[in-house]
Amino acid sequence: MEGRMQNVSSHQHFILDGFDELGELRPVLFIPFFIMFAVSLSANSLLLYVVISQQSLHLPMCILIAGMACVDLSLPLFFVPHMLLSFLFEWRGISLSGCLLQMYFVHLFGAFQSTLLLWMALDRYFAICTPLHYHERMALPRFLKFVLPLLIRNVFMVSLVVSLAGSLSFCFRNVMSHCFCEHMALVQLACGSTAINNLVGLMSVFLIPVADFILITASYVVIFSSVLSSGTSGVKALHTCVTHIVVMIVSLTIILTAFLSYRIRNGLPAAGRVFFSIMYLFFPSCFNPIIYGIRTAEIRRHILTTLSRCQPKQLGKGVPDGQSY
C-alpha cells in the first residue's frame, strides 16, 4: 500500500483500511455483509412497494414506515458496495472528494433515521393522548410545519460538519482504520488544529440524535402517564407502540455499543470498533423492515398477498386481523 506515509502538502487520496488485522481472512467478510446488503435491499424495497401500492396503507404511521424504508434502502448504497469491493478486490482507495460525498450522505441519512423515529413517537403521542385531534394534527399542511424545521436542521448541521472537514489539510498519514469515510476518522488524519471540527461535530450529536432521543423519551413519558390513567383501553392503545419501542431499544443498544467501543480502545481490537461502527448504520437497515413487516398486521397481510402471487403454493392463505405498529 504505497502512500501510507507520503510527505505531501495535503493528501487528496485515502486508504480505507478497516479490518486490516484479519489479513488473508478479510475477503471472508464479503459473505455476511453481502447477505445483509441483499436482505436490506429486498426487504426495504418490498415494504416500500407494498405501502405505496396499497391505498388502504396511506395512513400517517404507514407513510412514516415507508419513509423509514426509503432511508434504510438508501443509506447502505453510499458505503456498502465500496466496502464489499474492498473485501474482494482490495479496492481500498478513495479520493478526498469521494470521501466527503460519502460522508455527507451517510451522516445525512443517519440523521434522517433519528428524526423519523421522533416523528413516529409523535404520531403515537397524538393518536393516544389526543385521539380526537389526531387527523387534524397529522394532516399534511400542519405536519409539514413541524417536519421542515427538522429537515433544515439535519441538512444544515451535516453540511457544516462535512464542509469543515473538507477545509482541513491532511499532511501526515492518509490511512483510515475504517471501511467508510466516518467524520472523526478523517478529522484525526488532519494536521493543524481540529478544535472547531470537534466542537461542531459534538454540537451536531447533541442537536440531532440526542435532541431527538430526549423528545422521544418525553413523548413516551406522557403516553405512559396517559395510559396508566385510562385503564384497559389505554393498555390496548399502548400495544400499537410496541414495534416502535422495539426499534428504539435496538437502535439505542447499537448506538451505545458503537460509542463505548471507541471509549475502551485498550480493551477492544480495532476490528471490533470498525465492526460496531458499521453495524450502527447497517443493522437497522436490515432489522427495521423485518420488524415493521412482521409486527404491523395490515402491512404483513399485504406483504404475504404480494409474495403469494409469486409463490402461491408455499405461502399460507391467511393472517390474523388487527392493527399493530
Image (tube, helix red, strand yellow):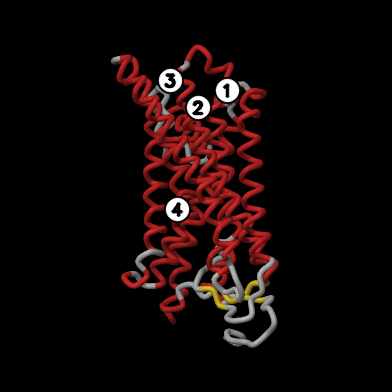
Q: CA distance from mark 4 to mark 3?
A: 30 Å
Q: CA distance from mark 4 to mark 2?
A: 24 Å
Image coordinates for residue 102, horizontal then vertical, percent: 63, 61
Picture quadrant where residue 233 is located: top left
Between 280 and 74, the one lying in front of the other is 280
User: Where, quadrant-wise, is the N terminus in this rendering?
Assistant: bottom right
Identify the residue at image location x=37%, y=50%: 253
Identify the residue at image location x=47%, y=32%: 121
SS class, disc 3: helix
User: Where, quadrant-wise, is the C terminus in this rendering?
Assistant: top left
Mark 2 lies on residue: 123
Task: Say the numbered circle drawn on residue 128.
Answer: 3
Between 271 and 188, the one lying in front of the other is 188
Q: What amino acid is labelled 2 in the image?
A: Asp
SS class, disc 2: helix
Q: Is residue 303 above or below residue 126?
A: below
Mark 1 lies on residue: 138
Cβ–Cβ below 8 Å for labels 2 and 3? no
Q: What amino acid is labelled 1 in the image?
A: Met
Identify the residue at image location x=58%, y=16%: 136
Mark 4 lies on residue: 283
Cβ–Cβ below 8 Å for labels 1 and 2? yes
SS class, disc 1: loop
Between 283 and 42, the one lying in front of the other is 283
Q: Is residue 161 above or below residue 314?
A: below
Cβ–Cβ below 8 Å for labels 4 and 3? no
Image coordinates for residue 108, horizontal then vertical, percent: 60, 50
Work out whether mark 3 precedes mark 1 in sequence or the reverse, and give the earlier one: 3
Picture quadrant where residue 46 is located: top right
Q: What amino acid is labelled 4 in the image?
A: Phe
Q: Residues within 10 Å of mark 2 (few under 14, many from 20)?
A: some
